[in-house]
Amino acid sequence: MRLVIQRVRSAQVTVAEAATGSIGPGLLVLAGFAPTDGPAQLAWMARKLVQLRIFADEAGQMNRSVLDAGGEVLVVSQFTLLADARKGNRPSYVGAAPPAVAEPLYQQFVAMVAELLGRPVPTGIFGADMQVSLVNDGPVTIVLDSPAG
């Protein structure tokens, strides 16, 4: 599993010109899933995401989590995060879970994050052609890979 985590002032995902999810200050999370991902990876990543200390404290140091800061989280599925572009010019996506495997993982991950935050987590629509807009704060962008299962 791979996440691209962006600290944002705001973010929105739209499908067919209709907003499916939007947030104010918080985290925009692009999430890609591998065929080998399971409950252990999902739980580890959800906890790490919610506890990641990348928000400023009173002294201006990145020492607060999204939970501490009262921020929101928007999660968007993105299979291209698992692309392998090391060979040739056309990326290979064999490392990405097929939709029948990835979609339940995505739904479970979103549910875990929502439970840890104690509130609903807006999302895009799995498999749809989505447009994502954001105002990156900092900018702070972190790539996080799950531990091997």
Image (cartoon, helix red, strand yellow):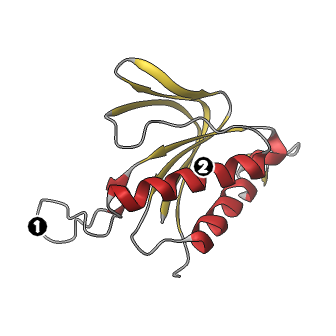
Left or right of 114? Residue 84 is: left
Q: Earlier in the sequence, mark 1 or mark 2?
A: 1
Q: Amino acid at mark 2?
A: Val
User: Residue at point 36% right, 57% down?
Assistant: 100
Q: Position of residue 123 (x, y in %)?
A: 53, 37
Question: What residue is disc 2 on?
Answer: 110
Residue 131: percent from left, percent from top: 37, 30
* Residue 144 vs residue 59, the one in the foreground: 144
Q: Which mark is residue 88?
A: 1
Residue 65 in sight in this render: no
Disc 1 crowd rating (10 Å Cα; few below 14, some 14-19, many 20+) is: few
Q: Residue at horizontal 76%, vertical 52%?
A: 116
94 displayed left or right of 125: left
Residue at x-position 67% and y-position 55%: 112
Near-viewer residue (65 or 20): 20
Q: Is residue 108 visible?
A: yes
- Which of the 4 image quadrants contains residue 137? top right
